[in-house]
């Protein structure tokens, strides 16, 4: 059986080389490529992706997986070998169960729906997007049906982004949290005057912003010997191997947090990839566990650490040196400004507290649409009604409402919940870390982040894709994903800031 396992590894190594090479091209496109390169780059990436797809879905891989099934049972579930077979099988099934004709129709519709979405958004008219979205929902419905049996047709789509999670599990977490979150937001709204974020607005030299961001993320543990920082329209992290994990950010000259918090957020994603096990080189295990697990790390560094008082006790004097205009702003005033919370229309600009409600409304609508309880035509109405009920504000138009995200035009249905699951998980992990490292707060105040990185690496990073989020939650904290720590964290932090 060792020779069959070796053959599987060899085949997957080829696939990984193709995918990582495509990543290099993607990175270049998002950072330094001149606009003229776009067409050829699209062809090149498509060819690499197509080749990778052919290698993964080769009948020989299916045969190898069948032959290895009995051997896999004998292996320790926690072994690298069992994980390699398990994760390769998951990917193989995902890519072979959907008929090629449906995949082709999906890509055709995706291209048209994206163009329709852009036009609809620009004209702020949902009706332009509606027929294509209707088609996309129908295609994703058929797609999910290829993975029968399931309890909810939403489940196979969720599983694409978050293996091992179901809509019922997410529903249980979200519906537990929701009424408390709505109440907390209302409470904060009633005390809006408590926080003034004007110190964050002003003129902040772009180069100084980048230099400070580099300094901070290096201290957190991002390894510049195995990474680099560049600019792009939207911040992102990408890796070609654990020894070359790159991040980007963007700079707003008149708003200080954008560049820095972008760097810290992407730094969280990147430290994860930099610290997967070196033994996973050229295997499908050399990735973070899932979308939500990844987001738990980026949000942990960005919010739990990077927007905390101990963190700024350490870094604020240095920030004041870099930007002397902050000399008249106290640490306390700066900390509060950085954590200002206020209901707003746009998800990507939302603060820590209100963010979750933006996600819940999307999760509810996706579930209802796939199950035929809401019609695509009624989405604007349903969207606005929930915005009013949860956040107390109503979008004045579709552009700032139902048309704000690109995801649905791309067919990414089932993706949104992960953003919030990541935040929720980040605090469950933080509670455990505080128990395991009793002086962690003092360490942060002293600017020491080694023990935090070591804890994350030991419990999460080194395992790569070996475990799913539910498995990690159970292994690390002894219980399933749970929302209570997250609510406690928000209530404590914002209760103090807003005097609730
Ligand atoms: Zn992220």
Image: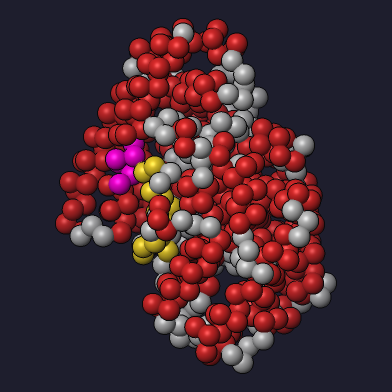
Residue 256 place in picture, x, y as percent:
51, 77
**Which sits in the foreground, 396 or 94?**
94
Q: Is residue 46 left or right of residue 91?
A: left
Residue 400 place in picture, x, y as percent:
50, 63
Quarter assignment of residue 75: top right
Residue 205 appears in the rendering: yes
Q: Residue at x 52, y 68 (%)?
A: 216
Residue 147 place in picture, x, y as percent:
52, 21
Q: Up-down: is 295 above or below 335?
A: above
**Which sits in the foreground, 8 or 170?**
8
Residue furthest toward the bottom?
328
Rendering colour mode = secondary structure
Number of numbered discs: 0
Q: Residue at x 35, y 12 (%)?
A: 60
Q: Residue at x 55, y 13 (%)?
A: 72
**Which sits in the foreground, 71 or 376?**
71
Residue 382 appears in the rendering: no
Q: Residue at x 40, y 11 (%)?
A: 3
Q: Up-down: is 463 above or below 408?
A: above
| Magenta span main SS | helix
In reply to whether residue 22 is colored magenta, the answer given is: yes
The quarter of the rendered structure image containing the C terminus is bottom right
Region of the chain picked out in magenta, as a range: 19-24
Q: Is residue 351 left or right of residue 175?
A: left
Residue 121 place in picture, x, y as percent:
41, 59
Q: Is residue 34 left or right of residue 201?
A: left
In reply to whether residue 412 is colored magenta, the answer given is: no
């Amino acid at each position: 059986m060792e020779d069959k396992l070796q053959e599987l590894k060899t085949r997957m190594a080829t696939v990984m080389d193709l995918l990582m090479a495509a990543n290099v091209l993607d990175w270049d496109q998002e950072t330094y490529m001149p606009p003229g390169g776009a067409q050829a780059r699209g062809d090149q990436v498509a060819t690499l992706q197509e080749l990778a797809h052919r290698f993964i879905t080769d009948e020989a891989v299916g045969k190898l997986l069948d032959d290895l099934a009995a051997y896999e049972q004998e292996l320790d579930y926690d072994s690298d070998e069992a994980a390699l077979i398990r994760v390769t099988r998951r990917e193989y099934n995902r890519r072979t169960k959907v008929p090629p004709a449906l995949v082709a129709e999906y890509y055709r519709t995706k291209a048209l729906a994206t163009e329709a979405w852009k036009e609809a958004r620009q004209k702020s008219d949902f009706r332009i997007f509606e027929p294509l979205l209707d088609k996309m929902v129908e295609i994703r419905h058929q797609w999910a049906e290829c993975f029968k049996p399931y309890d909810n047709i939403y489940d196979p789509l969720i599983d694409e982004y978050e293996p091992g999670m179901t809509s019922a599990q997410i529903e249980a977490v979200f519906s537990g949290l929701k009424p408390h979150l709505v109440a907390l937001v209302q409470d904060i709204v009633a005390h809006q005057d408590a926080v003034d974020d004007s110190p964050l607005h002003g003129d902040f030299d772009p180069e100084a912003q980048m230099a400070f961001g580099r300094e901070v993320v290096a201290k957190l543990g991002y390894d510049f010997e195995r990474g680099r920082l560049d600019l792009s329209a939207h911040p992102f992290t990408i890796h070609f191997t654990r020894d070359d994990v790159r991040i980007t950010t963007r700079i707003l000259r008149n708003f200080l947090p954008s560049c820095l918090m972008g760097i810290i957020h992407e730094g969280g994603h990147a430290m994860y990839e930099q610290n997967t096990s070196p033994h996973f080189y050229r295997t499908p295990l050399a990735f973070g566990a899932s979308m939500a697990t990844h987001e738990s790390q980026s949000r942990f560094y960005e919010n739990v650490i990077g927007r905390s008082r101990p963190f700024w006790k350490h870094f604020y004097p240095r920030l004041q040196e870099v930007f002397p205009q902050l000399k008249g702003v106290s640490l306390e005033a700066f900390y509060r400004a950085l954590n200002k919370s206020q209901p707003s229309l746009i998800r990507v600009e939302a603060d820590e507290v209100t963010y979750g409600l933006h996600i819940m409304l999307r999760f509810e609508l996706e579930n209802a649409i796939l199950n035929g309880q809401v019609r695509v035509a009624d989405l604007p109405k349903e969207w606005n009604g929930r915005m009013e009920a949860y956040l107390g504000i109503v979008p004045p138009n579709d552009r700032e409402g139902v048309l704000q995200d690109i995801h649905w035009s791309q067919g990414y249905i089932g993706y949104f919940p992960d953003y919030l699951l990541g935040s929720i998980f980040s605090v469950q992990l933080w509670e455990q870390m505080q128990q395991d490292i009793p002086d962690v707060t003092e360490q942060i105040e002293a600017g020491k982040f080694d023990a935090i990185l070591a804890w994350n690496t030991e419990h999460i990073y080194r395992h790569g894709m070996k475990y799913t989020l539910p498995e990690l939650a159970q292994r690390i904290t002894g219980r399933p994903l749970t929302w209570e720590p997250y609510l406690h964290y928000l209530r404590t932090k914002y209760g103090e800031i807003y005097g609730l």
